[in-house]
Image (tube, rainbow, N blue to C red):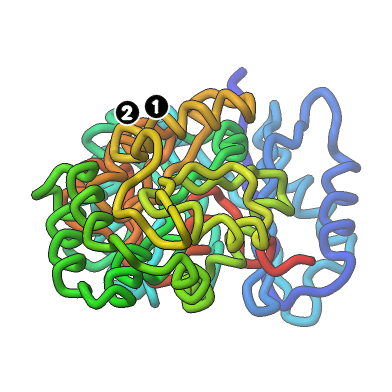
Amino acid sequence: MSRSTFLVTVSGPDRRGVGAELFSALRDLEGEDVRLMDVAQITIRGTLVLCAEVSAESPLTHDALVASIAKRPIAKDGMTASVVAVTPSDAVEGRRLLVTMLAPTISAGQLEGIFHAIAESDATCERIVHLASYPVDCYELIVIGPDHARLREALTTVADACGLDLAVQRAGLHRRSKHLVVMDADSTLLQDEVIDLLGAASGRAEEVAAITHASMNGEIDFAEALRQRVALLEGLPASVLDEVRASLRLTPGARTLLRTLQRLGYVPAVVSGGFLEVLGPLLEELDVTHVAANRLEIEGGVLTGRVLGEIVDRAGKARALERFAAEVGVPLEQTVAVGDGANDIDMISLAGLGIAFNAKAVVQAHADTALSVPYLDAVLYFLGISREEIEAT
């Protein structure tokens, strides 16, 4: 005999003891013929929805369930209870994906587009979690579907059209195992471009900025652009480095990102085309110990206009990511890279999750996802870390 399936739903104003009352009613019937298969609950603004799936040999179990629930004081104070026989639908086959989407606010219209894309990809959403409501709105969906490439393309198209930042990742514990988070410094961890600040201090701001702009857009090789810009700083007193360091502005959310990563056991790292002489003391204050950056040559208390050692360029950033991953002891699949410029592309492409942060189009094209909001701690949502966890101390 085929088994019958029943969905027991309790809903209404939440109060203490409702769950105990429901499971007491189910316990009285539980045995070889009646089994509890699944449980789900959500509470929104004090309103509870608690569901239990029960499998039974006999369709007569419906009446038994109703009678057992009626013996308990469940249906009172606005609470209702129902028992419905259900026919399991054909399950959607495929592996689960995590779809994370965020924006300053997320509207019903944006969600409509996302859910249309899921349905049109022959996929279904199994769960929705509201990770944050400020300073951005963020939802995480667990989606199952047979064709991940098709689903990813459909979701990305909708997200681009309606202004959502969206990431699609394989579901599983591996996401919480991304122990190394590597980020660029200039215009990512920092609001500033250090070389531009040095250019301003030397009176060559426009020349330096023009080279920086061309380099970040991939129009000039980064290493060559760096040499050209540093050459313009020849003769600048080394004391200016302290002044520039004091003027640096962290990106909103940067301290929160670093503090949360460290508290939850992740390892943050900074890989920068900037200069260790400027960044070093700041990163030491932030307790970031994995750092790769360029070095300025200083002689007689002034900058010579030359760079010391191997330049940390586009390829150098990727090598640094590999080196740090080996030092931390994690595979590249368990790393995250965040950056904004063309010299971050190799690093972003190599990491398990590459994030383009307020980045140029050429960088977004190589990233797994892009963030357009101005808060660096939004990176945490792509790791499944909720606002509640972020604010826990």
Q: Is residue 133 above or below residue 338?
A: below
Q: Which residue is mark 1?
A: 94
- At which x and y percent is residue 169? 42, 39
Q: Residue at x 41, y 51 (%)?
A: 296
Instruction: Using residue 152 as the reference point, say whether residue 57 is left or right of it.
Output: right
Nearer the observer, 76 or 284: 284
Q: Element under label 2?
A: loop
Instruction: Using residue 74 as the reference point, say whether residue 380 is left or right of it.
Output: left
Are circles 1 and 2 on residues that touch, CB within 8 Å? Answer: yes
Instruction: Using residue 366 as the reference point, say whether residue 125 is left or right of it.
Output: right
Nearer the observer, 289 or 207: 207
Give amino acid for label 1. Answer: Gly
- Would you say residue 252 is visible in this rendering? no
Name the quadrant containing residue 94.
Answer: top left
Q: Residue at x 66, y 42 (%)?
A: 53
Nearer the observer, 2 or 97: 97
Give amino acid for label 2. Answer: Pro
Whole-number angstrom distance, CA of label 1 to CA of label 2: 4 Å
- At which x and y percent is residue 25? 86, 50
Q: Which residue is mark 2?
A: 146
Q: Residue at x 22, y 61 (%)?
A: 232
Q: Residue at x 87, y 70 (%)?
A: 16
- At which x and y percent is residue 305? 29, 54
Count every numbered label the image shows and give the total: 2
- At which x and y percent is residue 387? 61, 66
Nearer the observer, 246 or 124: 246
Quadrant in which the C terminus is drawn: bottom right
Mark 1 surroundings: few (<14), some (14-19) or many (≥20) residues within 10 A = few
Among the two numbered marks 1 and 2 on one chain, the one whose residue lies closer to the N terminus: 1
Mark 2 surroundings: few (<14), some (14-19) or many (≥20) residues within 10 A = some
Instruction: Using residue 353 as the reference point, say whether residue 255 is left or right of it.
Output: right
Name the quadrant containing residue 192.
Answer: bottom left
